[in-house]
Amino acid sequence: MGSCKPQQEHVHGPIIIGAGPSGLAVAACLSEHKVPFVILERSNCIASLWQHKTYDRLKLHLPKQFCELPLKGFPHNFPKYPTKYQFISYMESYASHFNIHPRFNQTVQTAHFDKGSQLWLVRTQHCELLSPWLVVATGENAEPVLPRIHGMDHFSGSIAHTSVYKSGSEYRNQKVLVIGCGNSGMEVSLDLCRHNASPYMVARNTVHVLPREMFGFSTFGIAMALYKWFPIKVVDKILLLVTNFMLGNTNHYGIKRPKTGPIELKLATGKTPVLDVGQVAQIKCGNIKVMEGVKEITRKGAKFMDGQEKEFDAIILATGYKSNVPTWLKGCDFFTEDGMPKTPFPHGWKGEQGLYTVGFTRRGIQGTSCDAIKIAEDIASQWRTVENKNQCNSHIILLTS
């Protein structure tokens, strides 16, 4: 017996793929324009990355005013840096407020533009949906990056990506190798310290570490305020001058700074500076030990590029995430092989033939909000034209019948 053909459904408005902050932001903005939509989400909840793949002690790295979705801010009683759980509750109330009801457990297998019908055809494991508009909201962080390091298969201890790390309590009294020194690697190392584990953090690449606050104000807020008045290189010089005064020269502790300044680097490449919430103090006193690149993993530990060899009980991969768009979006050259829009910010939100992208700006929720507003306005203007045309056609049919 042949398999049944999936049921086909014509969607009255756009199809949004992904119910994270990006998908919810577009849906809310469309709701304001009275445009209907369908959201497909592969997980069983909204914001699944936040709900299932973040560690317990995570807080927003930026003050809440920089992390708000369009049209509805955080509750006033939330702290300056909301916790993971507060951010999740904010998104749940946001979805409820705008009457957003994603279709959960719907994994998109393929999506392509059908030239015959001039519609996007989206196929999940259960159905096929057709629409003139497709909004890709799966974002930059859809899948964990799992590097292949020589000897990993022979390691006798546990190896886990930060996407499954919850708390250092699982690693109490263990020697743990943390591979990666971005925000995740730094925060996991700090969390391990607080649970009496011994973290060894690999700092293979250069990274900027800045204080989360300077003189009681958010470092990011100060940077954005200065950027309105001064060239970006001047802003970076001011930030690094204050950082050296507050944290000292991180090069002395094995964390090498890039030659390009932190904000210039962030805007050019999306590489976010690490915001210090206590990690540098732990590095200075030796509780977090900084190691050079890993040469190979051994059965009991690792060999390093500088010739050292150490034993470890566990390895944590703080190696980040990547887009998964190329695995399911077919016949479209709007995205690179890495699954990012080829057109840089601020023009990467709109492709051809009704294709839109949100959550790929490398500028956090502020970038997402900016794109979501533009996408909704653009779709709404087209949708109204289609609706008016349909109404005219129905009047003509009534008059001629």
Image (spheres, rainbow, N blue to C red):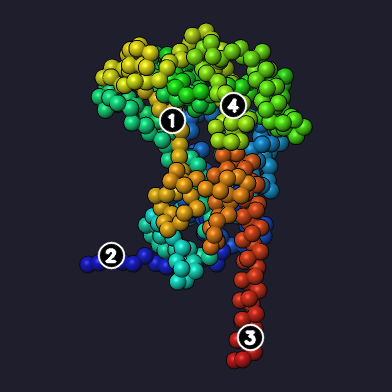
Is the residue marked by circle 1 packed among few (<14), some (14-19), or many (20+) residues within 10 Å? Answer: many
Which residue in the protein does label 3 denote?
A: 396
Mark toward the start of the polypeptide (2 vs 3)? 2
Kindly identify the residue that appears in the image at 62 percent across and 31 percent down: 264
Callout 4 crowding tier (Cα within 10 Å): few <14, some 14–19, many ≥20: few
For the residue marked with disc 4, what is the amino acid?
Answer: Thr
Q: CA distance from mark 3 to mark 4?
A: 64 Å
Report, in whole angstroms, how far the alpha carbon at label 4 lies from the one at label 2.
Answer: 56 Å
Between the residue at mark 2 and the residue at mark 3, the CA separation in whole angstroms equals: 42 Å
Report the disc number at residue 260.
4
Q: Quadrant of the N terminus?
A: bottom left
Residue under numbered circle 2:
3
What quarter of the picture does the C terminus occupy?
bottom right
Q: Which residue is mark 1?
A: 319
Between the residue at mark 3 and the residue at mark 1, the CA separation in whole angstroms equals 60 Å
Q: Secondary structure at mark 2?
A: loop
Q: Is residue 269 above or below residue 18?
A: above
Q: Position of residue 73 (x, y in %)?
A: 68, 42
Residue pictured at 37% horizontal, 17% vertical:
305
